Amino acid sequence: MSSNSTSNDDTYNQDAEELVWGWTLTEEGISAYFVAFLSLLAFTLFLSKYLYQFPRIGSVLPEAGLTVIIGIIAGFFINAKSNRVNEQDQPTNDDDFNRPVASTLLGFSSTVFFVALLPPIIFNSGYHLKRDLFFRHLTAITLYACAGTIVSTIVVGLLLYALVSLGLTGDFNPSFAELLTFGALISATDPVSTLAVFQQKKVNPQLFYLVFGESVLNDAVGIVLFNALSKFVGVHDTITQFALGASVFFVDFTILFLGSLALGVASGVVLALFFKVANFRLEKTRLLELSLYVLVVYFPFFIAEMSGFSGIVTILFTGITTQRYAVYNISPSTALEADVIFRLLSHLAEIAIFLNLGLSFYDDHGEKLKYMFVLWAVIACLIARACNVYPITFFYNKAIVYLAEKKFSKVEQNSVNASSRNAVNIPNGTEGSHTTGIYYVKKNTANMLWFSGLRGAVAYACAKTFPDDNGNSQAFISITMAIVLLSIFLLGSTTSLALSALDIEVDVDEDQYMQEHLETSFSCFQRFENKYILPLLLRDLREDADNNQKRVLLSEFFSDLDLSDFVPVRPAHDGDVELREQSDSLTRNEQPDSLSNFEQFNGSPSAKMHRGESSMYDFGA
């Protein structure tokens, strides 16, 4: 009796292991899985080389599209072999062994997506946001990513709910809570294919960073929205029930997002302080410095998940804060090596997700796919994207014009030098004239922003965790997969045509653009940062540091500013050096020679890496 019980327990444990892992927990089983998947990964990387060798092909077939195609082809053969094994009445032991490996290749678990693959992608996105352009356009990016994502979620949810209520979606009738949750996940943009073409064509940096910056923050907002709305599925399914619980949703969303943001910023600040206090710049400790630095890719993510916050939002703002402060406290060689590692992890994770998307194509999705609903969902996404981009662009531009005119009026009253008008260039004349400037979002730029709202890895990863309280989880996975594939192959492959049709400026020299569009005044945050944050976090601004070095570092940190109207000074109350606006008591004659040293240092690769200013065209897709 005891032996039978033990045997049954062993059988149960073995079945449970196979169910959880997807392959037998033996050396051979795990090895078979990784050999198969890594072979597909290597083959994909090899073929991707030709997209870069032949730009014309790359502009039509994005790397994400190539990866999906390879996954679909491989999935066809794996699925066919798996079906042959299932049809055998008495499969061999070898077939029994291969079956779980094959089934796992056809689909990752949602845990693998969120715990292993998404953190390096999101961190790398935040880490490689070019500081100058990202913070210059932070207001516009935040509006598109935060307000725009919420608008898009609501519009998709309401449009699809109206169509379901009218009986236009066939036999698929999801609840209002499910449709709103679907609206959140499908509003997460991932324009990796578009950005690859932008790099190749060298588009206007403003357009590049509006699209890139929005997609980065949009992912974080979309995931938090998705997680918050998922709690209503099966509990508050109707629109009336959801309205009654709306206050709970807004409180939950606000606490989750702001708490995660604060934890991410704190993680980056702690890392900067750690490397400021602990000196790892010695040659003998360089490997330790690199090892500790790259741990930031995952460590804050797990802390956030343990604390009940969003790990994705946390790791995004950790990446942004780390690049802004911590990178100055490590050696230049470590900064370069870490940059390569972050790009590598992100690139491999993204390829793995798109490869899995293709492999999952034959995983019984045909039976679950609701074709009529997919059609309406695509139309709803396009309408929602328009409701996001165009109203926000209109009101944002109105605000830019109003603030610029108010500023110029004040400048004229104070008889300030006319060169200060370069901050925002508003021409004389009526408001109807073509208003330009480094902030203003032109009409063709807004059109390209609408076009760039592709769906990708994040939307598919969220779909894998869609709540199944009403039994519609598999259907929404299939629907999301179809929309992502249509987005990649239809929108991604026609980006070059869209650039031409919309008359978008290409072949822009980034360095020349930055020189021609310099800021001429500190923002309120830059003043606060210059006076309080930088002396606290940056090693080379400590009191015993060389003043010449301090001036060089500050000039480098604020490299997007036209410093002709600023001078580095040393306040009497402490030993720190600050950059202050030139006044009557501080004349141009006080400008030190050290700025010429900065100009030499500023062009070096290590300096660009410290600033996070490796060219946007080096951005890894």
Image: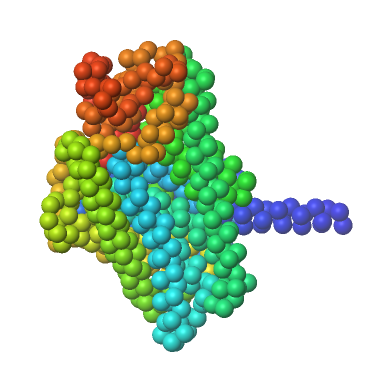
The reply to whether residue 552 is visible in this rendering is: yes
448 above or below 574? below
Q: Residue at x 52, y 36 (%)?
A: 267
Q: Residue at x 40, y 26 (%)?
A: 328
Quadrant in the picture for the N terminus = bottom right
177 above or below 406? below
Q: Position of residue 510 (x, y in %)?
A: 20, 39
Nearer to us in this view, 421 or 409: 409
| Picture colour scheme | rainbow
- Count of numbered badges drawn on the protein: 0
The reply to whether residue 38 is visible in this rendering is: no
Quarter occupied by residue 163: bottom left
Outermost residue to the right: 1
Outermost residue to the bottom: 166
Nearer to us in this view, 580 or 41: 580
Nearer to us in this view, 439 or 176: 439
Q: Position of residue 588 (x, y in %)?
A: 21, 22
Q: Position of residue 116 (x, y in %)?
A: 51, 46
364 above or below 253? below
Quarter occupied by residue 336: top left
Q: Residue at x 21, y 18 (%)?
A: 589
Q: Position of residue 236 (x, y in %)?
A: 60, 73
Nearer to us in this view, 268 or 57: 268
Q: Residue at x 48, y 56 (%)?
A: 223
* Apparent side of residue 84 relative to residue 23 in the rendered image (left or right): left
353 above or below 271? below
Quarter occupied by residue 542: top left
Outermost residue to the front: 413
